[in-house]
Image (cartoon, rainbow, N blue to C red):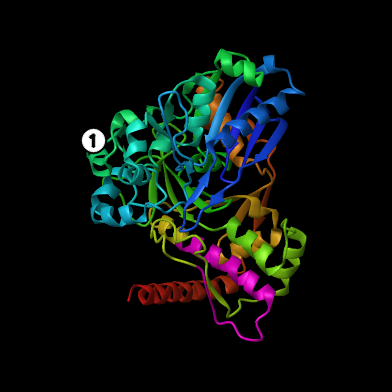
Amino acid sequence: MSILVLDIGTTSMRGILYEKNGEKIALSRRDNHLVFLGDSLIEEDPQEFADNTLSIIRELLQTYPADLVEAVAVTSQRSSIIPVDISGHPLLPTIMWQDTRNRSICNELSVYNARLFQLTGAEVSTVFSGSKMTWIRRNQPEIYQRVHKFLNIPEYVCFGMTGRFVSDTTYASRTGLFDLRKGIWHPELLRLYEVEEDKLCELKEPGETAGHITETYAGLSGLKAGIPVLHCGGDQQCAAIGHGILEEGDLSITMGTGGFIAAACDRLPPTLPERMIWNRSSIAGHFIMEANVLSCGAALEWCARELYGMEVIDYGRLEEEIRKENFVSSCLVVPYFSGRGAPDWDPEARAVFANITTATRRSEIFKSTMESIFMEIAGHLNDFEREVPIRNIYCGGGMTASPALNQLQADVYGRPVICTDDPEATGLGCLTVALAGLGEYASAAEAWKHLSIERKLTEYKPDLRKSRQYEDKRRQMEALYQSVRRGNRS
């Protein structure tokens, strides 16, 4: 018997068939296509998520018996929204998490940041979905009146499979509408964001059954009717578990389109310390501390495309380019191609290149761009260490395909970095949560012990001389950002 894991990312989605012992049987992948409309409006067609899900399932079932698929487990990017009517039909294109049409609303609500941080674990941000709902209410009231539910992408996909509007607490903790401690939609927050609770989904804990495959969806997909569909938590929560982040002191860095840093936390302190985001974990009743860099893999793709003319990233060639620059250069980059991420949200921030002369090489600009991303992450690591001593740093995501980038990370952080050979850490974490939810194991920690036996880890140790130089360069980068920011506001 097997579990089908659906991992829905920003630019692609994957379906992975796993045996219960963690062995991968088959994988199918489809691209999602962002639509850039200018003025930081970023959308996707909701139908693409539904079509890709069906296409993935059908492909997997061409070579694997549907009778052996015991459950579907879903993880996804977290803060995009799809307003739907009572039949589940989308009323607008998906407003993606990177979309900042809601920035004026966030600026307006930022006066409540201190209160909101203690209630929700985060200050107001354009990324979180609550203010996107407010934007629709204020700017498209005729649409808002027709909204039966505001869904995120996994809620939309699960509705298609089960006919039920259900979410879990990890996604709720990324809305700005959720009481982090009590685990409920908070009336005060709903009033502030002008959103009615009946337009939001029923909440369950990650790993609980959201619904069951309907006869209609069974006919479309080939899956058995009646098998359970489980929300297993957001992609970053699952990626953390897939990296083995189940106990305090362990931290994961996942480098996809954006870069996400997450550390396990068993309980919340009475007063939440700032300098990070606090979210619900995919382990029920637990939490994660989180920060992010909005451009990570996206910046790498930009460099590959615009500096080197690559349509597809050639990691081998980029490895050579990084190795050309065996020193910490004076070229300085502020890496905010898509704004500055948590906790110092600044959607207006943009990338800045400085200290460039006629002697500056293309390879130096590329390496400095990668350095800047890792320097931003290094600042977050320092913040995390004030709350929980960091024992281990595990890294995953597309950029870890490059040993040179992995070594660069260790040098910038001044700490050893452990990289996993499994590119599907998010899927593995989702499977871990699903197996615990289905009762195969008593807990996610027990499930993880049985699933992680075969993983291969590679450790990269830092050059501490370079690390000290990077710490100085990080302060220069921050000073440059603040200088440009002051200039833009004057």
Is 371 within the magenta?
Answer: yes
Outermost residue toward the front?
142
Mark 1 neighbour density, 10 Å: few (under 14) some (14–19) many (20 or more): some
Quarter of the image where the C terminus is located: bottom left
Q: Which residue is mark 1?
A: 187
Inspect the image, locate mark 1, and give the three-letter code of the amino acid beneath it.
Pro
Where does residue 291 sit, x and y in percent of width and height?
44, 53
Q: Is residue 90 above or below residue 321?
A: above
Quarter of the image where the N terminus is located: top right
At a point 39% along the width and 46% down the height, the residue shown is 128
On the question of residue 285 being in view, the answer is yes
Q: Is residue 348 above or below residue 121?
A: below
> SS for tag 1?
helix
Where does residue 84 sit, x and y in percent of width and height?
43, 31
What is the magenta segment's predominant secondary structure?
helix
Would residue 385 appear left or right of 428 to someone viewing this image?
A: left
Q: Is residue 344 above or below residue 243?
A: below
Q: Is residue 91 above or below residue 456?
A: above
In this picture, which residue range is highlighted in magenta?
A: 351-379
At a point 73% along the width and 64% down the height, the residue shown is 319
Residue 424 is drawn in which quadrant?
top right
At a point 77% along the width and 60% down the height, the residue shown is 316
Front in this rendered view, residue 250 or 226? 226
